[in-house]
Image (tube, helix red, strand yellow):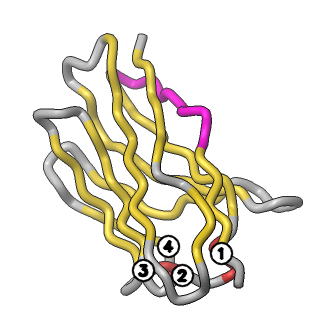
């Protein structure tokens, strides 16, 4: 069992920055890819960014050049640095951690971009 906890959400003005963190604990041996998803009100959950165990990254077109995903394997933590935030980035952001063919979700952290 893997326990996943996100943190770092909040209210930020358009154009601002925010850094999300996601820590995995429990049975963390052989953790694989770690992803960030988001879900806005009335919309489906969408993949924002992903990072493999080896550090390869991918991004949704809507966040390329503004968001950066990184991970610290020693801490079993993944980060999402968000810059140049837009109101349409407002959503609950979820972390998804893969291990041995299974996936584990966190509870989510709210990000609100508004003036």
The label on residue 60 is 4
- Give me the C-alpha separation between circle 2 and circle 4: 14 Å
Nearer the observer: mark 2 or 4; the answer is: 2
The residues tagged by marks 1 and 3 sit, at their Cα atoms, a distance apart of 11 Å
Relative to 18, residue 95 above or below: above
Q: Position of residue 107 (x, y in %)?
A: 61, 33
Q: Distance of mark 4 from mark 3, alpha carbons?
A: 15 Å
Q: Is 47 situated above or below 61?
A: above
Classify mark 1: residues with Cα within 10 Å, few (<14), some (14-19) or many (20+). Answer: many
Percent of width and height locating residue 100: 33, 21
User: In terms of image quadrants, where is residue 10?
Assistant: bottom right
Sequence-first disc among 4 and 3: 4
**Which residue is disc 1 drawn over?**
113
Q: Which residues are magenta?
A: 100-108
Residue pictured at 46% horizontal, 51% vertical:
8
In the rendered image, residue 40, in percent from the top left (x then y), is placed at 75, 61
Q: Earlier in the sequence, mark 1 or mark 3?
A: 3
Quadrant in the picture for the C terminus: bottom right
Marks 2/4 in contact by CB < 8 Å: the verdict is no
Circles 2 and 1: CB atoms closer than 8 Å = yes
Near-viewer residue (9 or 32) = 9
64 lies above or below 24: below
- Residue indicated by mark 3: 83
Compared across the picture, whether 56 is left or right of 105 comes to: left
Q: Is there a contact, CB below 8 Å, between mark 3 and mark 2? A: yes
For label 2, the SS is loop
Tell me the number on the disc at residue 85: 2
């Amino acid at each position: 069992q893997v326990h996943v906890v996100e943190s770092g959400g909040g209210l930020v003005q358009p154009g601002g920055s925010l850094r999300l963190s996601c820590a995995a604990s429990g049975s963390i041996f052989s953790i694989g890819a770690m992803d960030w998803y988001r879900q806005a009100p009335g919309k489906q959950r969408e993949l924002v960014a992903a990072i493999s165990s080896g550090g390869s990254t991918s991004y949704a077109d809507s966040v390329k050049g503004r968001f950066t995903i990184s991970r610290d394997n020693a801490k079993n933590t993944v980060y999402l640095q968000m810059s140049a935030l837009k109101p349409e980035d407002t959503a609950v952001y979820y972390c998804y951690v893969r291990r041995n063919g299974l996936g584990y979700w966190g509870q989510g952290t709210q990000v609100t971009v508004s003036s």
